[in-house]
Image (tube, grey):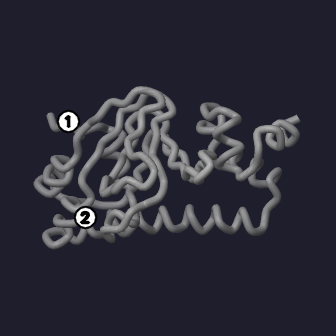
């Protein structure tokens, strides 16, 4: 049995593509299962990143680090979520780090190897397009919320959209994601 032949991953793929078993095996063979302990960095800020991630279990954060050492969370990924670096596919450097914030099992693939399958299978290209569309929609919604919503509304929206993640992140990480201090978050919660 292929080590990336995880039911959660297969269900995720079926949402976007319908490929034959030969092509599915080619795709699955790109991925390797890695186990990470809490607080482990998968990618440090400003390191090159050309990896495709699928979270089997655990929780991961994407974050920016300022020159004075302050961290601002950009996103959280939990079970059943997939992501990649948009800059990595363009041979550019991302300026965020990726850190495990719970013990996690993650499927990893080299994004450039994933792209090589495009030439042979339009369904793989469709998967990549859908993945990038989801990343862009999430990014646009987050940007809109920062421009149009109060911190309290951003908090309410997060709790409603990501109730499982809300239960698992610390107030420090949630405040950072919302773009506020922990003290401000405490006032919003009470």
Which element is circle 2 on?
A: helix
Q: Residue at x 14, y 53 (%)?
A: 26
Frontmost residue, 45 versus 142: 45
Residue 126: in sight, yes or no? no
Label 1, secondary structure: give it: loop
Q: Residue at x 76, y 44 (%)?
A: 181
In the rendered structure, find residue 124 and report the number of the disc placed on it: 2
Position in image of residue 169 (x %, y %): 62, 34
What residue is rendered at 22% in x and 41% in y? 32
Quadrant in which the C terminus is drawn: top right
Query: Residue 3 shows which numbered tag?
Result: 1
19 and 141: which is toward the camera: 141
User: How many other residues sit within 10 Å of disc 2, few (<14), some (14-19) or many (≥20)?
Assistant: many
Residue 22: x %, y % from top left: 11, 54
Can residue 174 be seen in the rendering of this structure?
yes
Q: Quadrant of residue 167?
A: top right
């Amino acid at each position: 049995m292929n080590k990336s032949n995880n039911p959660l991953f297969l269900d995720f793929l079926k949402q976007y593509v319908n490929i034959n078993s030969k092509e599915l095996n080619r795709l699955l063979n790109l991925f390797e299962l890695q186990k990470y302990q809490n607080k482990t960095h998968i990618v440090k800020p400003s390191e090159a990143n050309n990896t495709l991630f699928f979270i089997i279990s655990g929780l991961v954060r994407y974050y920016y680090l300022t020159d004075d050492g302050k961290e601002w969370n950009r996103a959280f990924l939990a079970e059943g979520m997939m992501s990649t670096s948009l800059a990595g596919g363009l041979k550019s450097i991302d300026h965020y780090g990726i850190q495990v914030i719970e013990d996690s099992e993650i499927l990893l693939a080299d994004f450039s190897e994933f792209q090589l399958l495009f030439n042979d299978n339009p369904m793989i290209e469709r998967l990549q397009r859908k993945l990038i569309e989801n990343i862009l929609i999430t990014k646009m919604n987050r940007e809109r919320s920062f421009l149009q919503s109060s911190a309290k509304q951003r908090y309410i929206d997060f709790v409603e959209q990501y109730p499982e993640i809300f239960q698992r992140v610390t107030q420090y990480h949630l405040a950072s994601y919302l773009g506020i201090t922990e003290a401000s978050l405490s006032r919003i919660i009470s």
